Image (cartoon, grey):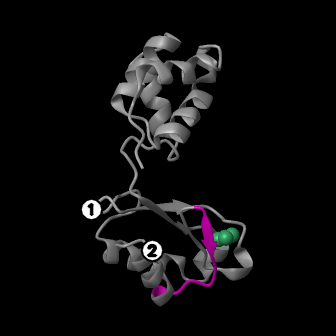
Amino acid sequence: MATKYDKAIASELIQQFGARPEMLVQVLHAFVKRYGFISKEAIRQIAAELNLSRAEVHGVVSFYHDFRTEAPGEHILKICQAESCQAMGSRELTSHAESTLGVAMHGTTSDGNVTLEPVYCLGNCACSPAVMVDDKVYGRVDTEKLDGLINECGG
Ligand code: FES
C-alpha cells in the first residue's frame, strides 16, 4: 500500500515539471499518484525546490480535497453527494457509512482499512445513489448493499 518516501524520487517528481512554482498543482498531483498523500516532508521538499514558502504550498494543499495530508486507508469508499444521488438518498447512505465505520467524511478507520470520502458525480446518475470502492463504481446502493461492500473491504 503506502510507498516509502524517497527524497531522490520526490525530487524527480518536482523536476519533471521543470521545478517551476506555477506547476505546483501538477507536482502535488504527481505526489498523490505516487504516495497517496502529501506528507509534511513532501511539503518541505516541494517548497524548497520550487522556491516557495511552506505556507504557500500548504495553502494550495488544503484548498483541494484531493490532496490528502494523511496516508489513506487500504480501501477508499466514495459516496456521491451530487444532486441526483442526493435525491435518491445519498445523505442517509453517508450517515450510515459514517456510523458503521466510526469515521466522518475524509476520515480513515482506526485499523487503517477504509477511508471515507465524498465525490461529486460518478457519471452513474441513472443508477443513483452511486458509490465507488477503490476504482469500481456501484449503483442503486442501499444500506444493505453498502454493508456488503464494507464487509468486502474487510472492515
Ligand atoms: S449524481 Fe451521483 S453519479 Fe451522478
Q: Residue at x 37, y 73 (%)?
A: 154
Q: Which residue is mark 1?
A: 111
Q: Residue at x 47, y 44 (%)?
A: 36
Q: Which residue is nearer to you in this view: 70 or 64?
A: 70
Which quadrant, please, contains the C terminus? bottom left
Left or right placement of residue 85 versus residue 125 in this view: left
The numbered mark, 2 or 1, whose residue comes first in the sequence reads 2
Secondary structure state at the residue bearing disc 1: loop
Residue 77 position, x and y percent, is 48, 66
Q: Quadrant of residue 83?
A: bottom right
Q: Is residue 23 above or below residue 61?
A: above
Residue 102 position, x and y percent, is 28, 70
Q: Specify the segment rendered in magenta.
A: 135-143
Q: Which residue is mark 2?
A: 94
At label 1, counting other C-alpha atoms closer than 10 Å, the crowd grade (few under 14, some 14-19, many 20 or more) is: few
Total marks shown come to: 2
Q: Is residue 53 magenta?
A: no
Secondary structure state at the residue bearing disc 2: helix
